[in-house]
Image (cartoon, rainbow, N blue to C red):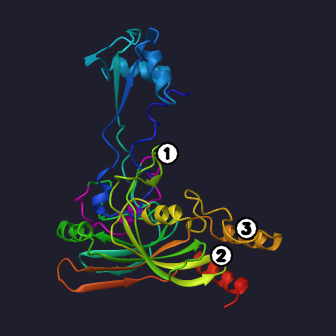
Amino acid sequence: MNDDALDDLPPDDIPDDAEGDADDDADVLPSTRVYVIRAAPNAQRIRLDQCITRSVENASRNKVQQLVEAGGVTVNGIVVLKPGRLVLPGDEVVCTVPKPPPPEIVAEDIPLEIAYEDDDVLVVNKPAMMVTHPAHGNYSGTLVNALMHYTTQLSRERGDDRPGILHRLDKGTSGLLCVAKNERAHTVLAAQFSDHSIEREYWAVVWGSFKNSTGSIDLPLARHKSDRKKMAVVEGGKEAVTGYEVLRSFGHLSLLRLRLRTGRTHQIRVHLSHLHHPVFGDPTYGGRRILYGSVTQRYKQFIEKLLDVMPRQALHARTLGFVHPVTRERVFVESALPADMQLVLDRLEEYFGA
């Protein structure tokens, strides 16, 4: 364990971006992280710094001692400043760890593909593997860094670290992303995201074939109980609805058109994975292993080559429609499939036949 361990503990948020709307982005990195430790009634007496170090994963004793001496720890509601104070059976220890201030966001000369632009709105075709905005572990090379170099006209409605950002796409998801260039545009467009009137269509290559060519997935989503970086279908979670249409079938893989009726973190990926149709190539939700078909040597080699082409989830935000915040006219933007997804489809055509 190093001396920075407490600073590096995972926050209660997903560091990468998401398929979520602006309203889903409310659970951003908190200003502090709180850990509650309750000593069992039959627990042995132990030093406070040792108790915290043993209970909080990756916490170093040096950092814990600094936190205690800075007044960041209470025992039974009383601030304790001595790391050597004994924790007794039944005591409740609360550690409040301040989030370190993020580094200054710097404009970076990163090429952008602009799909639409006027005085109020910008629609960017985000490449796969680019993070939408700076967050823990990703403070450079993001879309925001590129936007700040491209233009100074960006809404600051959501703070200086997320200028113009209205919604997000997962790091590994490519496609269209809407940006507000001023506060008025941000307010109007954010309302459209909130009431789910934004028109969005995704295309995805997924595992398996479908009995019905169209359908709707209505399953609530929440943070995974054991892995805070993942989402899961959880009873009592937030409502999440995904509509789908099968565009093509390729043996043991399918090309889907998907429409979000809600915008939850990882919504498409989790919904499809839960139904045993994970997005092809998805490293988080089971898309990088063969799930269907007789695993002949030829088939295995073919899939392995496809996965080399697609090191991320084969998911692309293809269309985006909204009411313009000033003119009130309908704006509709389309994006062609990126080269990696198109190559996967071409090879599937060749292997399974047109």
Q: Which mark is residue 147?
A: none
- Residue 76 in the image: above or below residue 316: above
310 with respect to 139 (left or right): right
Question: Is disc 3 surrounded by few (<14), some (14 to 19) or many (20+) residues within 10 Å?
Answer: some
Rendered location of residue 111, percent (x, y): 47, 71
If you read the primary sequence from the N terminus, does the residue marked by circle 2 or circle 3 appear first?
Answer: 2
- Where disc 2 sits, the SS reads loop
Q: Are marks 1 and 3 in contact (CB under 8 Å)?
A: no
Residue at 35% from the left image edge and 65% from the top image edge: 263
Say which residue label 3 marks.
Answer: 304
Q: Which mark is residue 252?
A: 2
What's the amino acid at mark 3? Glu
Q: Are marks 2 and 3 in contact (CB under 8 Å)?
A: no
> Residue reaching furthest right?
297
Say which residue label 1 marks.
Answer: 227
Rendered location of residue 128, percent (x, y): 52, 67
Q: CA distance from mark 1 to mark 3?
A: 27 Å
Q: CA distance from mark 2 to mark 3?
A: 14 Å
Q: CA distance from mark 1 to mark 2?
A: 29 Å
Rendered location of residue 114, percent (x, y): 40, 78
| Range drawn in magenta | 136-158
Residue at 33% from the left image edge and 64% from the top image edge: 167
What's the amino acid at mark 1? Asp
